[in-house]
Image: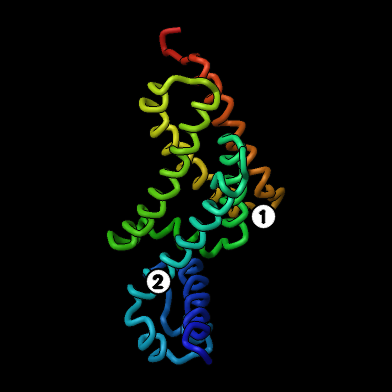
Amino acid sequence: MPREVRERQMLDAAVAGFARHGYQAASMDDIAEQAGVSKPLVYLYLKSKEDLFTACIRRERAALVEAVRGVTGRDEVPGARAEQQLWNGLCAFFAHTAARPDGWSVLHRADTQGEPFAREVAAMRAEITELVTLLLARAAVDAGCDEKFAEREVSGLAHAMVGAAESLAVWANARTEAVPSPKETAATLMNFCWTGLEQMIKGVRWSPHR
């Protein structure tokens, strides 16, 4: 069997094992058994449990970022407004996390498993946040908003939106009844964020002294 195929089997088994049990409790023996290989072969290919977990994070991170980037580039939808691209990106994000719940679980839980793993997830979050920041800034410009708005508030809004998307993905994947579709989950976030964003673009601001 070609090495890349065997390694993919190991990573598939490892993602499932880490998602089910967490990094600390996951057993290398169980992962090897699920992959249909010996434990020494897992160590030969992937060196250590830490390296195996890191490989899982990097694979799932790359797949998620690619899914989001693939539908948000202006070249993909000529003339598309930033608002539509943001919608496309959210739909792709929730479709991906729904289709690969184990992979999303590994990414979401890696933050709590130590510094090397947290750095990998932080890099993924930074990539997606950078993309959302760009789209929100474009949306503000499309709406005729001045550049001061984009410079002052867009970055914070992008971080808030990415954090909300991650939380919603966990919520949606945990449901066993009335499970929302990826588009329904994306619409929930767009309704929550975009309505408020439209008001901000128009200059409407909330104040605690109203």
Q: In the image as oriented, which residue stretches furthest toward the right?
A: 178
Q: For the residue carrying disc 1, how many other residues have a C-alpha within 10 Å: few (<14), some (14-19), or many (20+)?
A: few
Position of residue 102 measured from the top left corner of the image (x, y, whole percent): 54, 64
Q: What is the C-alpha distance between the residues marked 2 and 1?
A: 30 Å
Q: For the residue carrying disc 2, how many other residues have a C-alpha within 10 Å: few (<14), some (14-19), or many (20+)?
A: some
- Seen at 43% across and 85% down, the residue is 29
Residue situated in front as seen by the camera: 174 or 4: 4
Residue situated in front as seen by the camera: 137 or 58: 137
Amino acid type, residue under disc 1 in the picture: Thr
Residue situated in front as seen by the camera: 43 or 90: 90
Position of residue 127 measured from the top left corner of the image (x, y, whole percent): 41, 50
Report if the CB atoms under discs 2 and 1 are less than 8 Å apart: no
Depth check, mark 2 against mark 1: the one in front is 2
Hey, which quadrant is residue 148 in on the image?
top left
- Seen at 50% across and 79% down, the residue is 8
Dot 1 lies on which element? loop
Does residue 177 lie above or below 159 as drawn?
Answer: below
Does residue 21 lie above or below 118 as drawn?
Answer: below
Position of residue 113 measured from the top left corner of the image (x, y, whole percent): 34, 61
Hey, which quadrant is residue 40 in on the image?
bottom left
Position of residue 170 measured from the top left corner of the image (x, y, whole percent): 53, 51
Applied colour scheme: rainbow
Amino acid type, residue under disc 2 in the picture: Ala
Q: Earlier in the sequence, mark 2 or mark 1?
A: 2
Does residue 38 lie above or below 197 as drawn?
Answer: below
Q: Which residue is mark 2?
A: 55
- Seen at 54% across and 31% down, the residue is 193
- Seen at 65% across and 49% down, the residue is 182
Q: Which residue is mark 1?
A: 176
Q: Is 104 left, or right, of 50 in this rendering?
A: right
